[in-house]
Amino acid sequence: MKPLGSESTRRWRSAAVFSADLIAVTIAWVGSYVLHFDFSPPAEQVPVIASVLGFLLISEGAIFRVSGLYLGIWFFSSLPDLRRIINAVM
C-alpha cells in the first residue's frame, strides 16, 4: 500500500483538477452561446459551437499545462501561483 501523498495520488488529483477545469471551460463556452441567442441557438450554430469547442478545449488544456498552472497545490497557493494564473489567462 502506498502512502497517502504518493506520486500516483498526486497525479490522480492533478488529472481530476485538470478535467474539472476543462468541464468549466465547456460550461462557460456553451453557456455564453446559449445566453447570446436568448436560450435558443439556431440549428445552424450547433455545429459551430461543437467545432470551436473542440479547438478551445485543446488550446486551453495546452495553455494550462504549458504555463505551469497545475504545479502548485491550491491549499498552499502563493504569489508565484498567482503569476502563473495571470500568465495562463493572458
Image (cartoon, grey):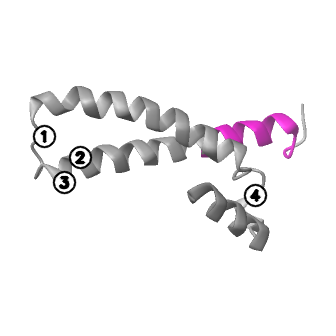
Report the residue at 48% width, 36% height from top. Answer: 57
Secondary structure state at the residue bearing disc 4 = loop
Q: Which residue is mark 3?
A: 35
Taking the image as shown, residue 45 lies to the left or right of residue 77, namely left
Within 10 Å of disc 2 (Cα), the crowding (few <14, some 14-19, many 20+) is some
Report the residue at 31% width, 29% height from top. Answer: 50
Q: Tell me whether the residue at label 3 lies in contact with that at label 2, contact meaning CB atoms closer than 8 angstroms.
A: yes
Q: Is residue 88 above or below residue 64?
A: below
Task: Give the CA distance from mark 2 to mark 1.
Answer: 7 Å
Q: Which residue is mark 1?
A: 41
Residue type pointed to by label 1? Pro
**Looking at the image, is mark 1 or mark 3 earlier in the sequence?**
3
Q: Which residue is mark 4?
A: 73
**Looking at the image, is mark 2 or mark 1 earlier in the sequence?**
2
Q: Tell me whether the residue at label 3 lies in contact with that at label 4, contact meaning CB atoms closer than 8 angstroms.
A: no
Q: What label sits on residue 33 in the rendered view?
A: 2
Span shown in magenta: 4-17
Q: Tell me whether the residue at label 2 lies in contact with that at label 4, contact meaning CB atoms closer than 8 angstroms.
A: no
Q: Main secondary structure of the magenta part?
A: helix
